Image: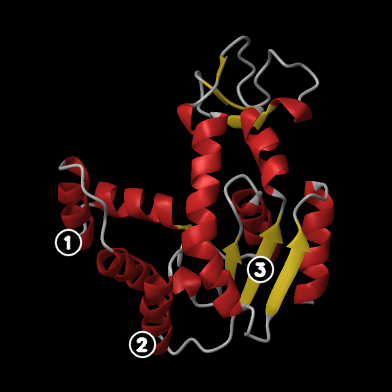
Amino acid sequence: MRILIFGAPGVGKGTQAKILSTKLHIPHISTGDLLRRAVSKKTPLGLKAKELIDNGNLVPDDLMGGIISEELQDPKTREGFILDGFPRTLPQVKILEDIFKSHNIEDYYVIILEVEDDVLVQRLSLRRMCSACGNIINLNYLKDSSKCPSCGSKNTFVKRKDDDETVVRNRLSVFHGLTEPVISHYREYNRVITIDGMLPVEEVTEKIMNHLS
């Protein structure tokens, strides 16, 4: 089973992708993790990406597409995958379509998680990172707001600049301008699953699994 997952920053697509990866026994391909892995492995494309990043440049679409194409050659993706973070723009849609064509991939599901902007801003403003282990949590879901549920450290939570309200609203603006046209493009595809991302995590997962089955 092959899945593309979409949603605005903070909607929970990374969380759902990881859960679905475990339930469906297929890899979660996060483009951010994929890029970091290519750099660390020092693949030819990874080295090229590292040079760009080190010089303060963005990784171009065609290079990112090449890294994704390499990943889809890995035997672990034969039974399927969940692609998270690509495509984000219409030009990237064309790149991904060419990649899928080269790998003889024709059928896939598109999952779209929807949450209102004001709710996302509230969610992200309550997000914290544990400075001891790097775990990301939301204060709403903690019984003890001072203790990290991952490593047990206390009073180690810090708020990242990415979760500042002004930054979050800017990220949402970019999402609406660049990625919503991508979502509109995929809504014409007959395997689109649209889910209310305001539901509890478990209910979102359940609804997705019901649609997939």
Disc 1: which residue: 44
- Classify 10 Å Cα crowding around label 1: few (below 14), some (14-19), many (20 and above): few
Q: Picture coordinates of residue 196 (x, y %)?
A: 78, 58
Earlier sequence position, callout 1 versus callout 3 = 1
Disc on res. 102:
2
In which quadrant of the rendered view does residue 208 lie?
bottom right
Q: Assign a secondary structure to mark 2.
A: helix
Q: Picture coordinates of residue 12 (x, y %)?
A: 66, 49
Residue found 35% across the figure and 73% down from its top: 69
Disc 3: which residue: 111
Earlier sequence position, callout 1 versus callout 2 = 1
Residue found 84% across the figure and 54% down from its top: 203
Residue found 58% across the figure and 70% down from its top: 183
Contact? badges 1 and 2 (CB < 8 Å) = no
Q: Picture coordinates of residue 117 (x, y %)?
A: 67, 47
In which quadrant of the rendered view does residue 108 lie?
bottom right
Earlier sequence position, callout 3 versus callout 2 = 2
- Classify 10 Å Cα crowding around label 3: few (below 14), some (14-19), many (20 and above): many
